[in-house]
Amino acid sequence: MVLKEIWKNGRLKNQPSISQKTEYKEIWKNVLTFLERDLSKGEIATFLGSTELINLHEGKARILCPNRLTMEKLRTRYAAHLAEAFQTVCGGEHQFSFEIKPFENTIPSDPGTASQPSLFHHAPPNGLAASYSFENFVVGLSNQLAVSVARAAVEQPGALHNPLFIYSGVGLGKTHLLHAVGNSVREKTPNARIIYASAERFTSEFIRSIQSQQTAATFRRKFRGVDVLLIDDVQFFASRTASQEEFFNTFNELFLAGKQVVLAADRHPAEFKNIEQRLVSRFAGGMITDIQEPDLDMRLQILRQKAAAQQAEVSEDVLLALAQQLEGSIRQLEGTLHQLLAISQAQKAPPTEELLKAVLRTAPPASAFIAPQDIIGSVCRAYQITSEQLCSANRSREVVLPRQIAAYLLRQISRASLHQIGGFLGGKDHSTILYGLGKIEKQFATDEILKNQVESIRGEILGKNR
Ligand code: ADP
Ligand code: MG
């Protein structure tokens, strides 16, 4: 008994065997790979690059950090991400404790908190991350409609916009907004039952639940007993599966009971390939709103807010330079600001424009320097039309297809934003571009010839610019 306890609490906990170490390494690698979905590579390298999973036992994960800054980041900013990653990689909910590598822990800190591993419970069962609120969500032209309908859903859940469906490209605030709705309802009505889950999580919990009648019933009770259901990344529901069916039934039951459902996805419901038509028409039965890319003013405002939240002093010039450099994803904007602050803190140097330049140099998209006109030119040559035709309002198929291909390649090669692509293609609306991109990707799935044609145009463009 005593021996067994020592084994359990001593050796197993503190000194994992070699095979366990290899397993932890593998798990940690998978966790980091999963995080790439939500975080930029630069952010992962800066904050997670030198971390390690040193123990995992009965849902308790111990993570070793190179320094205090990293430890704080993992505990606060990346807590929700880690919980979700572990949920996906290992299944179940986890508690995390963080430790600083002893020999690198040279920064003096408060006695009592420094080397004590800090244990905290994460991923409360409702999945809500408290740090995403309406208060810290900057409102601008690009998201004001989405915010106002989301607030209306908080004021009168289930009554005005049900379901509420929010879509946008990545990193534009959908997840933040879903959590904000949940947190805000909870503030107003502390007893309200609220669940936030991504479609992936709904699916994985569902799959685990069908192993026994009892767990299946618990799953049903959990999801069908809520007042507000927030489902993120709806595009991840796989085609014609039992989990989609389960979601459909859950949705119907909640809807009929007048409960609020809020959904987020990377595209308009009409663009779903995998999701059954009856579900799509349910989605479309309520309010659909998109979030667009923020303009310069809004980007600057977001940066000011994020810097203030970290109590970091960054000059307006530097914030403006950053806002000018990075368009599109707010996640990328935020990630770059965090990298800048981390490096400035590590080097004990102020976050100047020079430092910003250095940070931006570390992650330039490899092919950023191919001119959009080169891409448009190559597509026009391949389809024997002029660039005037390509950029015109002509809707005939001979022109529409090359235009959509140009949009696709501009997105892929130049990483241009939808708004920019619209501009390059003669002032098209960003939703037209989004629609076209969806169509082309759909065609790729069935049309090998088209796919090869586009690949060869891409090869020509990249080859010329090498
Ligand atoms: P999405 O789910 O659309 O990919 P997220 O909600 O994860 O995007 O947002 C990415 C990051 O950008 C998050 O850290 C979020 O807090 C931040 N963010 C997005 N929009 C805003 C905004 N309007 N104001 C403040 N922060 C924002
Ligand atoms: Mg998201």
Image: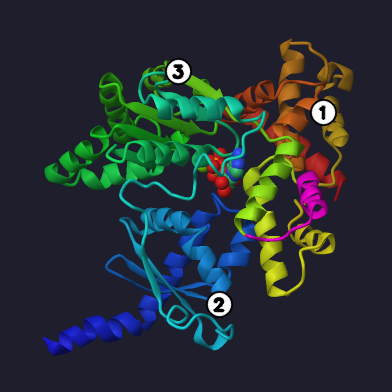
The quadrant holding residue 378 is: top right
**Residue marked by disc 1:** 424
| Label 3 residue SS | helix
Q: Is residue 327 left or right of residue 182?
A: right
Image quarter where the N terminus lies is bottom left
Q: In this picture, which residue range is highlighted in magenta?
A: 311-325
Q: Amino acid at mark 2?
A: Pro
Task: Name the residue located 31 percent from the left edge and 80 percent from the top edge.
Answer: 13
Measured Cα–Cα span from mark 2 to mark 1? 45 Å
Q: Is residue 407 visible?
A: yes
In the displayed image of the protein, which residue is found farthest to the front? 188
Secondary structure beneath label 2: loop
Q: 121 or 39, which is in the foreground?
A: 121
- For residue 308, which numbered disc appears in the image? none
Mark before the other along the chain sequence, 3 or 1: 3
Magenta stretch holds residue 308: no
Is residue 414 shown above or below 50? above
Three-letter amino acid code at the position of disc 1? Phe
On the picture, is 41 further left or further right than 122? right
Q: Which residue is mark 3?
A: 284
State the mark number for residue 66. 2
Q: Position of residue 266 (x, y in %)?
A: 54, 33
- Residue at (73% x, 30% y) in the render: 419
Ligand 1 shows up in which quadrant of the image? top right
CA distance separating discs 3 and 2: 48 Å
In terms of image quadrants, where is residue 181?
top left
Label 1 residue near ligand 1, CB within 8 Å: no
Q: Is disc 3 in contact with disc 1, using a CB cutoff of under 8 Å?
A: no
In terms of secondary structure, where does tag 1 sit?
helix
| x and y percentages locating residue 6 in the rendered image | 21, 87
C-alpha gap between disc 3 and disc 1: 31 Å
- Which one is in front in this view, the residue at disc 3 or the one at disc 1? 3
